[in-house]
Image (spheres, rainbow, N blue to C red):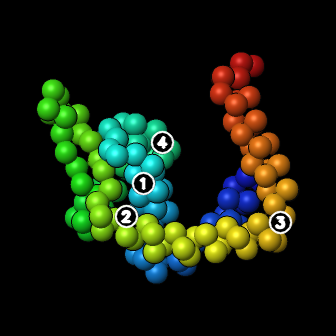
């Protein structure tokens, strides 16, 4: 519950900006992930964004309809879909990213850079420790 409350506290500051750009949190995650690659398979994108494939499918369809991403098939396997961010999508990420960076800076100012870095490090450690199943 503590992790969920902290996530909600953080996201409550980002949501108004995302709404301003007509984006959901999940759409934003997809667009941000796509800025780090030339293109990516949909299953890898689902994994990178922590989205279930059916949810990602709907999000990709919506983002493509808005011209923010482009989909293609792999020549060797037409069933395998690839996704890439479009120039329009990159422009939107650039504009929305400025808002996000200002929020990150304010969070860092309020919480402290060292404490934020420590928190991120500890969360990564927790993730790594829990990577293997817990047997009881």
Q: Earlier in the sequence, mark 2 or mark 3?
A: 2
Location of the C terminus by quadrant is top right
Q: Earlier in the sequence, mark 3 or mark 1?
A: 1
Q: Secondary structure at mark 4?
A: helix
* Position of residue 80 measured from the top left corner of the image (x, y, whole percent): 23, 34
> How far is mark 1 from mark 2, CA to CA?
7 Å
> How far is mark 4 from mark 3, CA to CA?
27 Å
Q: Earlier in the sequence, mark 1 or mark 4?
A: 1
- Residue at 18 percent across and 39 percent down: it is 73
- Residue at 64 percent across and 75 percent down: it is 102
> How far is mark 3 from mark 1, CA to CA?
28 Å
Question: Which marked residue is nearer to the observer: mark 2 or mark 3?
Answer: 2
**Which numbered disc covers residue 48?**
4
Question: Which marked residue is nearer to the observer: mark 2 or mark 4?
Answer: 2
Q: Earlier in the sequence, mark 1 or mark 2?
A: 1
Q: Earlier in the sequence, mark 4 or mark 3?
A: 4
Q: Is residue 112 left or right of residue 69?
A: right
- Please indicate, yes or no, whether residue 12 appears anywhere in the rendered image: no
Q: Which residue is mark 3?
A: 111
Q: Toward which corner of the image does residue 10 lie, by quadrant?
A: bottom right
> How far is mark 2 from mark 3, CA to CA?
30 Å
Q: Is residue 97 left or right of residue 136?
A: left
- Please indicate, yes or no, whether residue 4 appears anywhere in the rendered image: yes
**Which numbered disc covers residue 35?**
1
Q: Residues within 10 Å of mark 3 (few under 14, many from 20)?
A: few
Callouts 1 and 2 close, C-beta under 8 Å = yes
Q: Which residue is mark 2?
A: 90
> How far is mark 1 from mark 4, CA to CA?
12 Å
Up the image or down, 79 lies above or below 50; here it is above
* Position of residue 121 measured from the top left corner of the image (x, y, whole percent): 77, 43
Q: Residues within 10 Å of mark 4 (few under 14, many from 20)?
A: some
């Amino acid at each position: 519950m503590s992790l969920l409350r902290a996530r909600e506290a953080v996201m409550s500051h980002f949501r108004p900006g995302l709404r301003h750009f007509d984006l959901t949190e999940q759409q934003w995650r997809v667009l941000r992930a796509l800025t780090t690659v030339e293109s990516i398979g949909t299953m890898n994108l689902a994994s990178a964004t922590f989205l279930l494939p059916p949810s990602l499918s709907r999000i990709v369809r919506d983002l493509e309809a808005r011209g923010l991403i482009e989909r293609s098939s792999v020549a060797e396997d037409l069933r395998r879909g690839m996704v890439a961010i479009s120039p329009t999508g990159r422009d939107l990420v650039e504009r929305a990213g400025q808002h996000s960076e200002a929020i990150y800076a304010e969070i860092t100012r309020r919480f402290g850079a060292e404490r934020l870095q420590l928190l991120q490090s500890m969360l990564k450690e927790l993730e790594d420790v829990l990577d293997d199943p817990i047997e009881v």
